[in-house]
Image (cartoon, grey):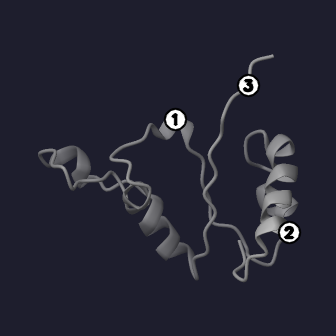
Amino acid sequence: MDKEISHFWLGYFKNEEDFYSFVEEDENYYIEEETDDQYVSKFAESQNIKWFDDDFIEYGFEDESLGLYDKFAEYSYADQWIPILERKLNELSLDTPV
């Protein structure tokens, strides 16, 4: 059986505008001459990744009051990864909502 590796990044933002400012691509990335300190987005910079293929990324801003299943049920393959995510989050005992 083939297996795929998925990477998850969960964060907390007070509002949707701040979230999308963080994750959306900076159009100047494609216009300006490439430099060593240029990243496609603030998210990419936070991960020390210059660029990523947006065909393989999925993101969204979800209501913090919802449970994990309600927040992420519409995401790709959610039924396969939500139980694992839930277990890992419980192990971390975070003070901040996801």
Q: Quadrant of residue 14?
A: bottom right
**Quarter the N terminus occupies:** top right
The amino acid on which the numbered mark 3 sits, given as a three-letter code, is Lys
Residue corresponding to mark 1 = 55
80 lies above or below 11: above
Residue 42's quadrant in the figure? bottom left
Classify mark 3: helix, strand or loop. Answer: loop
Q: Secondary structure at mark 1?
A: helix
Disc 1 and disc 2: Cα gap in Å? 27 Å
Residue that numbered label 2 is attached to = 67
x 44%, y 66%: residue = 22
**Which residue is drawn at the image coordinates 64% and 63% (left, top)?**
10
Q: Amino acid at mark 2?
A: Gly
Residue 5 in percent (x, y) is at 66, 34
Vertical placement of residue 63 versus 6, above or below: below
Residue contact between numbered discs 2 and 3, judged by CB atoms under 8 Å: no
Q: Nearer the viewer, mark 1 or mark 3?
A: 3
Which residue was labeled with disc 3? 3
Q: Looking at the image, which is closer to me, 96 or 27?
A: 96
Q: What kind of residue is marked 1?
A: Asp
Numbered label attached to residue 80: none
Badge 1 or badge 3: first in the primary sequence: 3
In percent of width and height, residue 18 lies at 48, 75
Instruction: Classify mark 2: residues with Cα within 10 Å, few (<14), some (14-19) or many (20+).
Output: few
**Residue under the image location 77 percent in, 56 percent down:** 72
